[in-house]
Image (tube, rainbow, N blue to C red):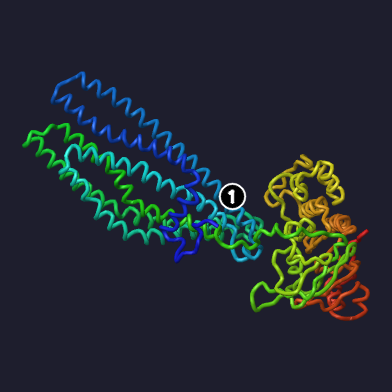
Amino acid sequence: MKASTAESPDRYATLPLVRRLLVDEALGHWRRYLLAFVLMGVAAAGTALSAYLLGKMTNEAYVDRDYHGVVVIGLLAIVIFTIKGMATYGSAVILSSIGNRIVADNQRRMFDKLLRENIGFFADRHSSEFVARLTTGAAAVSQVINLLITAIGRDLMSLIGLSIVMVIQDPVMSLAGFITAPPALLFLRTLIRRVRGIAWMKFAGGTHIIETMQEALQGMRMVKAFSLEDEMRRRLAASVADVERESNKMARVANRASPLMETLGGLAVALALMYGGYRVIETGATPGEFISFLAAFLLAYEPAKRLARLNLDLSSNLVGVRVLYEVIDSPPGEPSDDHLPPIKLAAARLEFADVHFAYHAGTPVLRGMSFIAQRGKVTALVGPSGGGKTTVLNLIMRFYDVDSGAILIDGQDIAKVSRRSLRREIAHVGQIVHLFRGSIRDNIALGKLGASEAEIIAAAKAAHAHDFILSLPAGYDTRVGEYGLQLSGGQRQRISVARALIKNASIILLDEATAALDSESERHVQEAIGELCKGRTTLIIAHRLSTIMHADCILVVEGGVVVESGPHEELLCKGGRYASFYRLQLKGQGQAPTREPIAVG
């Protein structure tokens, strides 16, 4: 572990954060930073020399009346400014290149960290928060480092060079240039805490803007259906107004020092002018010294002002660094377990052995769940909402780990094998189908990366999707749109079945895979699911009992336990909970079910 991540009283305070940035982020690029420093030093020297040469030029022209000397100094100025321009360009390009690399590295780190979190990490957080943290935080890391580098390499070296020119020309007059620093620094210290608080509020407001925009665009059908346009405008307007208000606060606070610094600067210039004029007029000093000093002083004013504001600017940008590191530093919800042995399946026999689980302490969801699912058999889970059915599937895929008991596959505790190997053996099809950006071909191939065209087409045919795909203008190259909205619900579902088929997994998990479909679409999807389940261990969650009547074993789940189990006819004969559910659905339908059940060949 890096030293920078060690525990400290406040690891996100200014100094620990700056130290971490320099050690963890900047140190790896020290050679290129050194080259940028050298170039900035050359540019700073050019700035100081230009101020010095201005005095020499004045004396050559107005005191010595030497035109040859003026020409030489003019030619020398061209060389100096050319070198300064090239050095400035080189340092800017190098710093931008390093900054872009740091931004890219941190974006990758942030995304990798999110991929190593479990489902519970995202349950109570909006995705817009992570978008904001990714974009704001990664850029802030680069901005803070560049602030530090340019403050030292450009501003500090320029200020030192120009101060040397000022002292050479007149040490006493130089004192006037330094009187502005102490009062300005004292005043700026009082603003830092205020700026940090405002920066946090701006970040939160920006996150709310992204959240509102994202929800409105993703839920545009609901927005239109319920005429929510005005409400969405109101929400966005409120978030935008919050950010605007905080931005105005930031503008007022961050620039509050400007009147003081300008006044102090004016005082210093006035003192320098009066003293310099006195020396030239009364003591016979050469005007070149006075002009050179004044040029150096005026050129030094901007870098001095930037250095005085450095802590203020750092405090604002370090808020962005913190929001990035807070995610990166948090313990991963799914730490890498690739060191564990891979699961090895033969019969793919799945067993829940007295499993207890709770999402939140004190509110158990499963209370000793036990059952067995066999290969080539369909095991259906039915029961009231909140009974723990979906939790069963979540635990099988190790989105969460059990509190006690064990989940065994062919006698192997899934908690003692690597997640990656376990999930390779599981295919999941849910009621909500998530298709990724790209074509139909791309989405099917996600089930088996690197799949051949023949494998993709074979999976589509088995999922009863091939014919409708070919009927589309671009066939398998048809773009599915965001979340697959270019396709109908039944089409999306069949694509998801094809994606599961090409995976060729040993265990199939179906969570209300046909609940939202019309009769025709459901028939096609049921046929596709029948192909998917052949010869595999299959668990199905279904509320419509008509879809699982022919399941080999039906488990009635209530209160986190299996209260009844057996085939459809046997459970009806018992007259228990399943029979009550069945009669209730028949009464609601007003007739016997007519939909075709899942048939496993």
| Direction top: furthest residue | 68
Q: Nearer the viewer, residue 302 or 44?
A: 44
Q: Is residue 390 above or below residue 224?
A: below
Left or right of 571, for residue 40: left
Q: Mark 1 packing: few (<14 Cα in 10 Å), some, or many (20+)?
A: some
Left or right of 499, for residue 333: left
Q: Is residue 324 above or below residue 460?
A: below
Left or right of 150, for residue 207: right
Q: Residue 96: horizontal and vertical position, in percent?
A: 47, 40
Q: Residue 534: horizontal and vertical position, in percent?
A: 89, 57
Residue beneath disc 1: 108
Residue at x-position 72% and y-position 60%: 340
Residue at x-position 47% and y-position 52%: 21
Task: Name the secondary structure under disc 1.
Answer: helix
Q: How many numbered discs?
A: 1
Q: Is residue 302 above or below residue 251?
A: above
For the C terminus, give its image quadrant: bottom right
Q: Residue 278: horizontal and vertical position, in percent?
A: 9, 39
Quarter where residue 475 is shown: top right
Residue 245 shows up from this direction: no
Badge 1 amino acid: Arg
For the N terminus, give its image quadrant: bottom right
